[in-house]
Amino acid sequence: MKQTPEEALAELQQSVQSLFLSTLTKKEGVPNASYAPFICDNANNFYLFVSQLAPHTADLQANPQASILLIEDEKDCRQIFARKRLSYSCYATVVEKKEANYEGLLDQFDARFANMIPLLRTLPDFILFKLSVESGSFVQGFGQAFKIDQDGSLIHHDPRKDNDE
């Protein structure tokens, strides 16, 4: 049975453990691509626990605008040109250690990535970012592109008819 777009989006978001992260470099504003493991909350906020030694961390601290991409693994796709993919424009903020939800979020990281988080929690250069989704799109396959509304609903997108992008 064919998946609904909502089911396909949820499955993709649950099946991948890391996301592609696009930031702008601190000084030059040049695009920088990277990746990071993530967790996601019920409000569709994404969280990254990253080292301050990584260039993308300095980028996010200097310019909180970012894009993220979750994409179907190549080995699992039926057509390389139509991989399922979810893209969001986000605004990044640091979750401070003193915030009430900080330890709970790291516990969620620990549950998902148990083999590394206990060690990373002890390293002083690791910080937690919250990526708040501002807008997004989801591609389920050929002719199956959707904009994601603020409330998370999918709206079929036809670039031949929609000239706003």
Image: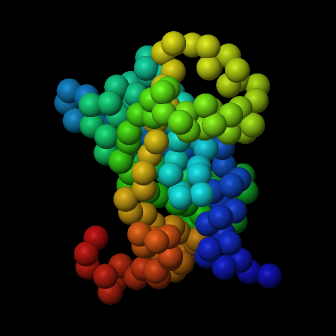
Residue farthest toward the left in the current orientation of the protein: 28
Q: In this view, does 99 lie above or below 74?
A: above
Give the position of the N terminus as an image quadrant. bottom right
Q: Return the x and y of residue 50 as percentages of the image width and height.
A: 51, 27
Counting labels gives: 0
Q: Is residue 164 above or below residue 93?
A: below
Snapshot quadrant of residue 94? top left
Q: Name the side, left or right, on which 165 lies relative to 79.
A: left
Q: Return the x and y of residue 17 as percentages of the image width and height.
A: 66, 43
**83 or 105, which lies in front?**
105
Q: Is residue 107 visible?
A: yes
**Which residue does the image show at 57% across and 13% down from the upper left?**
123
What colour scheme governs how the chains and residues are painted in the rendered image of this protein? Answer: rainbow
Residue farthest toward the bottom in the current orientation of the protein: 161
Give the position of the C terminus as an image quadrant. bottom left
Q: Can residue 79 be seen in this view?
A: no
Q: Name the side, left or right, on which 76 lies relative to 86.
A: right
Q: Return the x and y of residue 5 as percentages of the image width and height.
A: 61, 76
**Which residue does the image show at 53% across and 57% down from the upper left?**
44
Q: Return the x and y of residue 127 as percentages of the image width and height.
A: 48, 25
Q: In this view, does 140 lie above or below 62?
A: below
Snapshot quadrant of residue 122? top right
Q: Is residue 146 above or below residue 133?
A: below
**Which residue does the image show at 35% across and 79% down from the upper left?**
159
**Which residue does the image show at 25% across and 75% down from the upper left?**
164
**62 or 141, which lies in front?**
62
